[in-house]
Amino acid sequence: MPSSEATRLRLRVTGAVQGVGFRPFVHSLADRYALAGFVRNDSQGVLMEVEGARVDDFVAALKREPPPLARIDTLECETITPLRDAKFSIEPSHDGKTRTRITPDAAVCDDCLNDLFDPKSRFYLYPFVNCTHCGPRYTLTRRLPYDRAQTSMAPFAMCDDCARDYADPTNRRFHAQPIACPKCGPQLAYLGPHDASLKARGLGAAMDREPSGSHHAALIQQIVVTLQSGGIVALKGIGGFHLLCDARDETAVAELRRRKGRDAKPFAIMVADTASATRAGLFSEEELRLLQSRARPIVIVEKREDFAPSVAPGLSRIGVILPYAPLHHLLFHAATDLALVATSANPSGEPLIVDDEEAREKLASIADLIVGHDRAIVARADDSVAAIIAGAPALLRRARGFVPEPIALANDGPDILALGAHLKSTITVTRGREAFVSTHIGSLDDRATIDFYRETIARMLDILDVKPERVACDLHPDLASTRYAEETGLPVIRVQHHAAHIAAIAAEHKIEGPILGAALDGYGYGDDGGAWGGELMLVDEGHWRRLGHIAPLPLPGGDRAAREPWRMGVAALAAQDRCGDVFDRFPGMELAGKVAMLASAPNVARTTSLGRMFDAAAALLGVRLVQQYEGQAAMELEALCQSPRALANGYSIENDILDLTKLFAALLKPGLSASQGAELFHGTLIEALAQWLRAAAQARGQTRVALGGGCMMNKILAEGLVSRLRDFGIEALLARAAPTNDGGLSLGQAHIARMRKV
């Protein structure tokens, strides 16, 4: 680019460039290089014109030094006629068809934390401090372009001080749309305690009346007193309300479980800082980086500190999260030794609560203290959950901090709306060569969640300005998601559940052409209407083919067998013609004999599900006979496995059918402990799956395979299988950007629908 006084450039930037301080950044660069012109947001991203002698230096710095939260996807540059401007300005935003995007919410930055705890700062102890480098984005934005009037900050008129910062190009809050301070911004709101419970549990006189005046500090102290006294607090955060209690107080944690109706599913804990985190769990360097990332996900690690037994009963791993909102930091500032259970505030199974009035109504019977605020949450967002698996981050739940960041695709294609299935529901919208996977929605079991599902679809299509050409859904004819697809009036592409698991991995890894994979999970509706879940699949050009599967076991009781693993234990005995052993193995089950007869019947339903194989193993070893939450038996079995070891000849493979009968027989050996059995089961399963995939790959000339489905959340299984396949010269691809469980199905459906020739 030639340098001269007369050079003027027009630059178009797309990507994550709104709500990240990009315009102030451009303004400061223009000042640095003495350039005139303008910058503005529009529906495409950011448009700017610069004129002066050092435009080439400007362009180089633009690429080299973007703001912390920005991500430049494309930068287009053209030389235009000079206008001889006298200055550089930030112009009002322009509307139009949206091609840009909102950035995810980001944890409070170090500079804002310094302001939060600096007595000389006007943001001192203010729970809503933020700047262009941090704070809420997606959860408070109603539409694009990203301007204050388009967010839930619109009702809060800036005071003179905030307006001055907002207009000062040298200030970190220059054009920070959520800027606010105690004079003009949102305020915490006392929504009331559950009085009868408080008095019964003696939580102190401080709880007898509503705080008054400028009450942030007093209310925070009130929260801490409640927590330290064994109480439960409902606290409104960035994407919804949390329920909090002392993670070291067994009585408090057990009471939270009772009130919320959450029997045993593990809770995550929030701790003050990385020093506290490393006392709570065993963190590798990669896990610590993930924990401290701007997204601030819950990170699953091996437990180190013994918290209350009810935090994660029966498990060796725990979810740990650091504070990410200023309000969280204020709690830990008031009581540095806190370790808090931090779980979504909602009656079990319903969507996350975001509204203050709804919190008053639905959380009064759960929380001893409810604290909200008057900044509306536009979009619900649970905490994301992640783990380091096989050396890299993998998302187990994709929500706050990651949504709505797109997943880059290999090629352009038609705009698709993909609807997921039933459990762990998400939706995906594609636009060009980007796939936008929604926040975690949940299981479509009740009207409230289905309403949230429909609300999410409408919001995603609106905010991305997409009119889909096709809609993709699961093969199952009776799901709420399938019925929604049929209501749209669009061409419907029905995608088999396990093909979608494999296709999701192909999409995020930009795989073109055929991909061989194993989809290993609990249940998916098969091409034949059967209960699939251990499938060898080939996906190519929008189509799929089932090449093989795990040898099926009886499924006595259908869906009930998924809730009662002892039934799968009976099925494993029946497969070995050992029904007579059910009374000794399951003496407390009155129906054991009848279930054995059912499992032996020639017309009983059967399943290829690896999830049900885990259940059978857990039952035979006495680990778990009845499940209180999905995957409990498999997770407890994993927790018992210290060093997996393979049983010689513990499986057989014939015509791409993997038979585990010999492994189940070995688990019945007298004197075998539960931990020994868990090690034998994991080790043999890893070897069996690796050999199964190796044979299939070699037969078809493939050197890489995709490993998908909920069973790939088992760290021992996933890492063991990746390592063993590497020994065979086969690259194993795992889900990273989207969950490997059913939360990633919508991405796979979208991939197949884009590829399908219709």
Image (tube, rainbow, N blue to C red):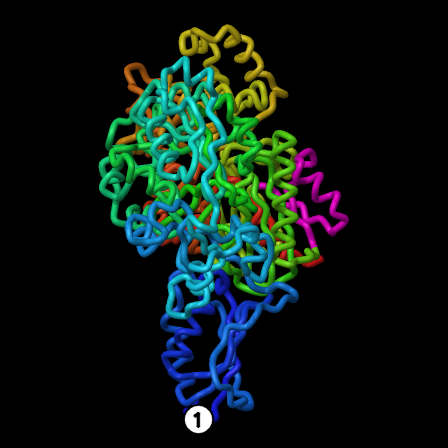
**Location of residue 452 (image quadrant):** top right
**Location of residue 342 (image quadrant):** top left
State the count of labels: 1
- Name the residue at 42% across, 40% down: 712
Q: Is residue 447 above or below residue 589?
A: below
Q: Measured from the top left, where is residue 144 in percent x and y?
A: 59, 59
What residue did someone put label 1 on? 5
The answer to if 282 sits in the magenta stretch is no
- Name the residue at 51% across, 26% down: 363
How many residues crowd around disc 1 within 10 Å: few (fewer than 14), some, or many (20 or more)?
few
Disc 1 element: loop
Q: Going by the image, does 462 lie left or right of 198?
A: right
The answer to if 477 sits in the magenta stretch is yes
Q: Going by the image, does 486 lie left or right of 231?
A: right
Question: 739 or 541, which lies in front?
Answer: 739
Res. 659 in view: no
Q: Give the extent of the magenta segment.
A: 470-497
- Name the residue at 50% across, 65% down: 15
